[in-house]
C-alpha cells in the first residue's frame, strides 16, 4: 500500500471529552440538558451541525437557534481542543513506522477544517501529512466520497494503493463509496458490530496492527 487516509476523532485522537465539555457548555448556556461521554460517542462523526442536532435530542429548534448553537460549539471547541485530548496509545509509533516505510499520510475529518488543522499541528508537529482536510463550507462531508477523491488526487495514488481507517459507520461508508479498503479502528468510539454492518474489510485492535495490514 502506498498511502493511508485516517479519520481524526476516535482514530488518531481521543477527543471525546473536549467535544463533550464544549457542547455541554453551550447546552447549559441555552437551557438544554447535558449529556454523558457515552452519549457523545454516538453523537459525533457527522460534522458539527449534526452533533448539535443530536445534542438537543429532537427539540424543535429554528435555523437561527441551530446556527447559534453550532457557532457557540465551534468557539468553545477551539478554546478547549487541547484540554483533555490526546493521541491514542500507539498512534505516534504507528505514524513514525509508516513514515519510515515511505507511506504517505492523510487525514479526512468531518471536524471543521480550521479545528482539524489546529489540532493536527498541535498534536503532530513533527509528522508530515500530505493532505489534511476537514469540513469546509460548500463541500459535502463524509460519507460523501468527494474529500477522499480529492486526497487521492493530492497523493497521486490509485484507489487500490490506499487504506482508509476510521472508527464509525460514516468512515466505513466513506471508504466504500470511494472504492477504498476500509479498516475499522476498534479502539475508537464505536464497536465492531457497527463497523462490520457498514462494510469494514479489515480491523485493527491496536494502531500498530496497521503496519501488518499494509502487507495484505
Image (spheres, helix red, strand yellow):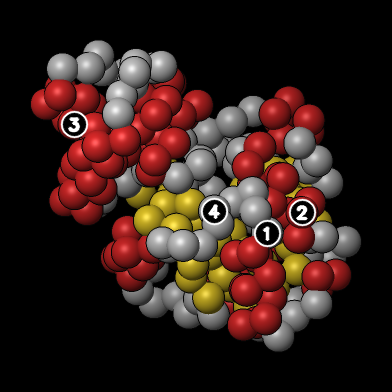
Kind of element beneath mark 1: loop
Kind of element beneath mark 4: loop
Residues at marks 2 and 4, CA–CA distance in whole angstroms: 12 Å
- The 10 Å Cα crowd at callout 4, few under 14, some 14 to 19, many 20 or more, is many
Residues at marks 1 and 3, CA–CA distance in whole angstroms: 31 Å
Q: Where does label 3 land, which residue?
A: 26
Residues at marks 3 and 2, CA–CA distance in whole angstroms: 34 Å
Res. 140 image quadrant: bottom right
Q: Residue furthest left?
A: 29
Res. 180 image quadrant: bottom right
Q: In the figure, 54 relative to 73: above or below?
A: above
Q: In which quadrant will I find the N terminus?
A: bottom right
Q: Nearer the viewer, residue 110 or 167?
A: 110
Q: Earlier in the sequence, mark 3 or mark 2?
A: 3
Residue 79 is marked as none
- The 10 Å Cα crowd at callout 3, few under 14, some 14 to 19, many 20 or more, is many
- The residue depicted at 70 percent of the width and 29 percent of the height is 194
Residue 177 is marked as 2
Q: Earlier in the sequence, mark 4 or mark 3?
A: 3
> Whole-percent x and y of residue 50?
44, 36
Q: Earlier in the sequence, mark 2 or mark 1?
A: 1
Residues at marks 4 and 1, CA–CA distance in whole angstroms: 8 Å
Total numbered labels placed on residues in the image: 4
Residue 141 is marked as 4
Residues at marks 4 and 3, CA–CA distance in whole angstroms: 23 Å
Q: Earlier in the sequence, mark 1 or mark 3?
A: 3
Q: Where does label 1 land, which residue?
A: 145
Amino acid at each position: 500500500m502506498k498511502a493511508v487516509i485516517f479519520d481524526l476523532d476516535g482514530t488518531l485522537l481521543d477527543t471525546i471529552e473536549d467535544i463533550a465539555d464544549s457542547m455541554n457548555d453551550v447546552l447549559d448556556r441555552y437551557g438544554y440538558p447535558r449529556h454523558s461521554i457515552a452519549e457523545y460517542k454516538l453523537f459525533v462523526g457527522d460534522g458539527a451541525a449534526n452533533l448539535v442536532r443530536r445534542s438537543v435530542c429532537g427539540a424543535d429548534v429554528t435555523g437561527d437557534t441551530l446556527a447559534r448553537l453550532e457557532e457557540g460549539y465551534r468557539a468553545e471547541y477551539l478554546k478547549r481542543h487541547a484540554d483533555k485530548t490526546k493521541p491514542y496509545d500507539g498512534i505516534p509509533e504507528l505514524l513514525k513506522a509508516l513514515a519510515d516505510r515511505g507511506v504517505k499520510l492523510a487525514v479526512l475529518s468531518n471536524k471543521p477544517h480550521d479545528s482539524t488543522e489546529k489540532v493536527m499541528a498541535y498534536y503532530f508537529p513533527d509528522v508530515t501529512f500530505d493532505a489534511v482536510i476537514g469540513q469546509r463550507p460548500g463541500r459535502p462531508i463524509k460519507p460523501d466520497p468527494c474529500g477522499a477523491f480529492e486526497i487521492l488526487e493530492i497523493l497521486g495514488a490509485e484507489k487500490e494503493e490506499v487504506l482508509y481507517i476510521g472508527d464509525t459507520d460514516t468512515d466505513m461508508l466513506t471508504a466504500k463509496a470511494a472504492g477504498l479498503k476500509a479498516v475499522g479502528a476498534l479502539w475508537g468510539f464505536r464497536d465492531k458490530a457497527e463497523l462490520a454492518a457498514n462494510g469494514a474489510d479489515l480491523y485493527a485492535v491496536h494502531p500498530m496492527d496497521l503496519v501488518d495490514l499494509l502487507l495484505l
